[in-house]
């Protein structure tokens, strides 16, 4: 065990010292000790990644959950141990969150940690590595996987097998008005992969596209999103508006509009609850006859949204001939808008144009209170971004909504925005 690198994040100096000594007693001498999240991140930046990070949960300032998210995003720890004086359910919840983000969680320890319990978790790590039962090292978010890596096809299994497509799940990110009204959610696909953990679209969409699997993926997302909407309708008396991303290849199917309307009917939902998001460049490159399905759906009441507005080589005239109801401004224009007059001019221009066309505007990627405030000054578009909420599982979304709007039906879904 003496070659292990371990980081301890613990703000109590006595506990920190005790853990350090326990590790030394287990022949672990490469120890980074940090009394706060910033210090821990700095140590990792200076000294490189570690095998195990021991994370205390409660701290003044950024807490252990933030550190866990950082580790999941940066892949700077192979495994984590959660440490906390809170009760078991809180520790278990934190471990669940960490696993959801793809981290290998060795276990959680109540405080003060006992030397025996810590030693057992170190053994879990060593055994996992020795016997090759440890989850695979995490992928970089930008890494795109090949079809062969994603689908090690077992005998008797074939591509598009329901057991595989069940691993495609929806995460939902709220769209909110600047006054705090929940306007709906966007469904974003994730792959809950048995080997690699939770994958984001950048890691697998290219492979699925190559394999011609965008259609089954899109139908699954439509089903999941409409099912959620109808469950909210039953529980609260008001359907949750949902948005689903539609790749241009879907528009090649002549029955696309009819099948969507049939799906809405199957869930007992009016077409108004569904928004189809189509990226700008694909709208411009799609032959007119293929846009007929979108037109038909719009006539029936569905909403159409231009995703990533301003990123294609826009022929704005053609874009505006189509009956879009919403325009989404991507994060590139929004990040740092508060300090960049050019970016706010782009957003302001899009807002003015949209108002004249009676379209709604959703600004994506709003990450900070400064950007949020800058938008208030620009005519109050709707917003979507980490500042309001990250994309989350259905269960997490339902409790997020209940916390902010009350669990009972008939209440407006008004949120408290903490600035
Ligand atoms: P999109 O439709 O423009 O979705 C918005 C993306 O921005 C999402 O990335 C979301 O997680 C991310 N995002 C939201 N708020 C913030 C923020 O404050 N900061 C930053 N940095 N990012 C933020 P995600 O989930 O990785 O999806 C990427 C793209 O993959 C989507 O872009 C969409 O084009 C595509 N996609 C996702 N789900 C589906 C799907 O079910 N079908 C199809 N065809 N495409 C999908
Ligand atoms: Mg979208
Ligand atoms: Mg977008």
Image (cartoon, rainbow, N blue to C red):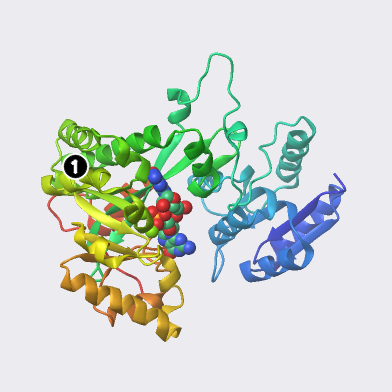
Q: How many marks?
A: 1
Vertical order, 177 against 113 (above or below): below
Residue 383: tell me if it is visible: no
The location of residue 217, given as percent across then percent down, is: 40, 36
| Left or right: residue 299 compared with residue 90 | left
View extreme (top): residue: 156
Q: Residue at x 21, y 45 (%)?
A: 292
Residue 231: quarter of image: top left
- Quarter of the image for residue 194 reads top right
Q: Determine the image quadrant of residue 419.
A: bottom left
Ligand 3 quadrant assignment: bottom left
Q: Residue at x 76, y 34 (%)?
A: 127
Q: Neighbour class for label 1 at 10 Å: few (<14), some, many (≥20)?
A: some
User: On the picture, is 248 further left or further right than 23?
Assistant: left
User: In the depicted view, which residue is nearer to us: 414 or 11?
Assistant: 414
Q: Is residue 5 visible?
A: yes
Which residue is at 59% across, 56% downward? 73
Q: Position of residue 100 (x, y in %)?
A: 51, 44
Where, quadrant-wise, is the N terminus in this rendering? top right
Q: Which residue is at the front of the view, 168 or 286?
A: 286
Identity of the residue drawn at 72% across and 45% down: 118
- The relative height of residue 37 versus residue 87 in the rendered view (above or below) is below
Q: Position of residue 183 (x, y in %)?
A: 23, 58
Residue closest to the eye, 15 or 389: 389
Front residue of 252/374: it is: 252
Q: Position of residue 53 (x, y in %)?
A: 69, 54
Ligand 1 within 8 angstroms of badge 1 C-beta:
no
Residue tagged by mark 1? 235
Q: Seen in the image, is 216 located left or right of residue 194?
A: left
Q: Secondary structure at mark 1?
A: helix
């Amino acid at each position: 065990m003496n070659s292990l690198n371990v980081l301890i994040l613990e703000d109590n100096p006595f506990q920190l010292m005790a853990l350090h000594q326990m590790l030394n007693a287990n022949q672990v001498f490469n120890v980074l000790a940090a009394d706060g999240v910033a210090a821990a991140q700095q140590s990792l930046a200076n000294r490189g990644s570690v095998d195990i990070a021991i994370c205390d949960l409660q701290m003044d300032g950024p807490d252990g959950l933030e550190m866990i998210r950082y580790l999941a995003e940066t892949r700077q720890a192979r495994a984590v141990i959660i440490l906390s004086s809170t009760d078991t359910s809180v520790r278990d919840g934190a471990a669940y969150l960490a696993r959801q983000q793809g981290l290998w969680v060795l276990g959680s320890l109540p405080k003060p940690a006992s030397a025996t319990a810590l030693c057992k978790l170190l053994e879990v790590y060593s055994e996992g590595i020795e016997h090759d039962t440890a989850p695979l090292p995490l992928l970089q978010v930008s890494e795109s996987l090949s079809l062969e890596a994603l689908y090690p096809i077992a005998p008797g299994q074939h591509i598009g097998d329901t057991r595989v497509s069940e691993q495609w799940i929806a995460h939902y990110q709220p769209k909110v008005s600047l006054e705090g009204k929940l306007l709906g959610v966007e469904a974003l696909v994730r792959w809950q992969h048995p080997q690699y953990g939770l994958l984001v679209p950048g890691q697998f969409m290219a492979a699925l596209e190559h394999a011609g699997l965008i259609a089954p993926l899109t139908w699954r997302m439509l089903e999941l999103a409409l099912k959620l909407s109808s469950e909210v309708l039953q529980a609260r008396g008001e359907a949750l508006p949902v948005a689903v991303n539609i790749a241009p290849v879907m528009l090649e199917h002549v029955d696309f509009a009819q099948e969507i309307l049939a799906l809405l009917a199957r869930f007992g939902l009016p077409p108004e609850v569904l928004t189809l998001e189509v990226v700008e460049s694909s709208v411009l490159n799609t032959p007119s006859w293929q846009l007929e399905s979108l037109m038909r759906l719009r006539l029936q009441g569905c909403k159409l949204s231009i995703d990533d507005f301003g990123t294609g080589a826009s022929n704005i005239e053609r874009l505006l001939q189509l009956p879009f109801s919403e325009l989404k401004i991507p994060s590139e224009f929004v990040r740092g808008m508060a300090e960049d007059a050019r970016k706010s001019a782009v957003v302001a221009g899009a807002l003015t144009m949209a108002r004249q066309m009676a379209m709604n505007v959703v600004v994506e990627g709003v990450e900070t209170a400064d950007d949020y405030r800058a938008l208030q000054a620009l005519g109050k578009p709707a917003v979507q971004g980490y500042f309001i909420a990250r994309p989350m599982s259905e269960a997490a979304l339902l409790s997020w909504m209940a916390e902010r709007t009350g669990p009972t039906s008939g209440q407006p879904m008004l949120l408290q925005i903490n600035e």
